[in-house]
Image (spheres, rainbow, N blue to C red):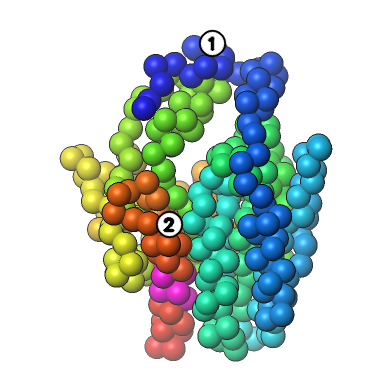
């Protein structure tokens, strides 16, 4: 249900410190980053290199940030980046990234260098939220002098390899809570009116409008369609307000918007969007869709390199 008015703030006025503090006080821990993510990373250590690339201190909590790498990293191989959990509430992004490493990463050994960051925003993961404790969206904050500690830490990690990545797959979800909570909260935070939208039923991708790769996106859609259904365009030929350029594909200017998928200079980039609230999809299917997208993306890039 879409709220008539967001319960924090005054319509027409952006939040100040008091409103942000009230919002923060409403957030509660609902799951464990240590158990769900760090535990999984620890189990993968026998087969992959895992290292801490930063730490988020949000008293009384402190969160180590982990990246997983190919064990035999080679300077002569192209680099592939997989990210999840930029938005902590997007569960299959986190678990899909971990499941990809567990089930498929080893078959790419000696072919690409893999860097997988499964949960960029652990505080938000635990609270099943989109923002960090300062009510900042990390996925609009991947830019110089980032206001989000999550985004800044990740950018420092990838900076030395920015020009070596050939591919970046960023794993996300679009949920019903986008309309019931997160978009109304965003409008309230910024002192704007909330205009209801439409949640697409199914999987879709966000290509980079500055350097589109239509054949690449189509290959991912074809692979994911074997696992779960693809979102149709709405009556306006759009998905979440953007023109559908191919079945299940829209485009954003990734770098301009400060999105995670625009952090590197990789020629092939995509943002996945799974719909976990569909009656036609299970949590297992959502994770599998993310895994299928990553595998299809890597396979496509490797095939192009061989031609």
Percent from the top left, x then y, of residue 252?
Answer: 42, 49
Percent from the top left, x then y, of residue 207?
Answer: 40, 57
Q: Check disc 1 and report its element: helix, strand or loop.
A: loop
Kindly report which numbered mark, 1 or 2, lies closer to the viewer in this rendering.
2
Q: CA distance from mark 1 to mark 2?
A: 37 Å
Q: Residue at x 63, y 62 (%)?
A: 117
Query: Does the magenta run of residues contain 297?
Result: yes
Asked if residue 215 lies left or right of residue 120, the reply is left
Q: Magenta residues, as a range?
A: 292-298
Residue 255 visible to an observer of this rendering: no
Image quarter in which the C terminus is found:
bottom left
Mark 2 crowdedness (10 Å alpha carbons): few <14, some 14-19, many ≥20: some
How many numbered marks appear? 2
Q: Main secondary structure of the magenta part?
A: helix
Asked if residue 86 lies left or right of residue 179, the reply is right
Q: Residue at x 42, y 62 (%)?
A: 284
The image quadrant that residue 285 belongs to is: bottom left
Query: Does the magenta run of residues contain 61?
Result: no
User: Residue beneath label 2, please?
Assistant: 283
The image quadrant that residue 211 belongs to is: bottom left
Earlier-in-chain disc, 1 versus 2: 1
Asked if residue 147 lies left or right of residue 179, the reply is right
Residue 232, compared with residue 147, is above or below; it is below
Residue 18, compared with residue 162, is above or below; it is above
Q: Between 134 and 141, which is closer to the camera in this rendering?
A: 134
Residue 116 visible to an observer of this rendering: yes
User: Residue beneath label 1, please?
Assistant: 10
Q: Residue at x 48, y 33 (%)?
A: 182
Image quarter in which the N terminus is found:
top left
Q: Between 246 and 3, which is closer to the camera in this rendering?
A: 3
Residue 134, compared with residue 207, is above or below; it is above
Residue 45, compared with residue 24, is above or below; it is below
């Amino acid at each position: 249900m879409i709220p008539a008015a967001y319960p924090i703030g005054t319509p027409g006025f952006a939040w100040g410190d008091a409103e942000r503090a009230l919002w923060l006080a409403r957030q509660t821990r609902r799951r464990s980053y240590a158990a769900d993510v760090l535990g999984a990373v620890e189990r993968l250590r026998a087969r992959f290199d895992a290292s801490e690339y930063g730490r988020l201190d949000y008293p009384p909590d402190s969160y180590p940030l982990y990246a997983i790498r190919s064990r035999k990293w080679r300077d002569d191989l192209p680099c592939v980046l997989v990210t999840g959990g930029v938005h902590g509430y997007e569960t299959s992004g986190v678990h899909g990234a971990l499941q990809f490493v567990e089930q498929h990463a080893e078959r790419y050994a000696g072919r690409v260098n893999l860097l997988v960051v499964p949960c960029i925003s652990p505080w938000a993961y635990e609270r099943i939220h989109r923002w960090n404790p300062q009510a900042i969206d990390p996925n609009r904050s991947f830019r110089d002098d980032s206001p989000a500690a999550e985004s800044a830490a990740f950018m420092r990690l990838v900076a030395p390899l920015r020009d070596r990545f050939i591919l970046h797959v960023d794993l996300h979800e679009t949920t019903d809570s986008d309309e019931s909570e997160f978009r109304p909260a965003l409008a309230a935070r910024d002192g704007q009116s909330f205009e209801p939208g439409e949640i697409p039923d199914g999987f879709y991708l966000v290509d980079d409008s500055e350097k589109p790769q239509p054949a690449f996106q189509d290959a991912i859609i074809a692979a994911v369609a074997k696992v779960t259904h693809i979102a149709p365009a709405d009556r306006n030929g759009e998905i979440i307000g953007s023109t559908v350029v191919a079945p299940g594909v829209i485009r954003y200017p990734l770098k301009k918007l400060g999105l995670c998928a625009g952090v590197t200079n990789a020629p092939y980039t995509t943002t996945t969007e799974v719909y976990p609230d569909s009656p036609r999809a299970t949590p297992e299917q959502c994770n599998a869709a993310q895994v299928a997208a990553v595998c299809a993306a890597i396979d496509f890039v490797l095939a192009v390199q061989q031609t």
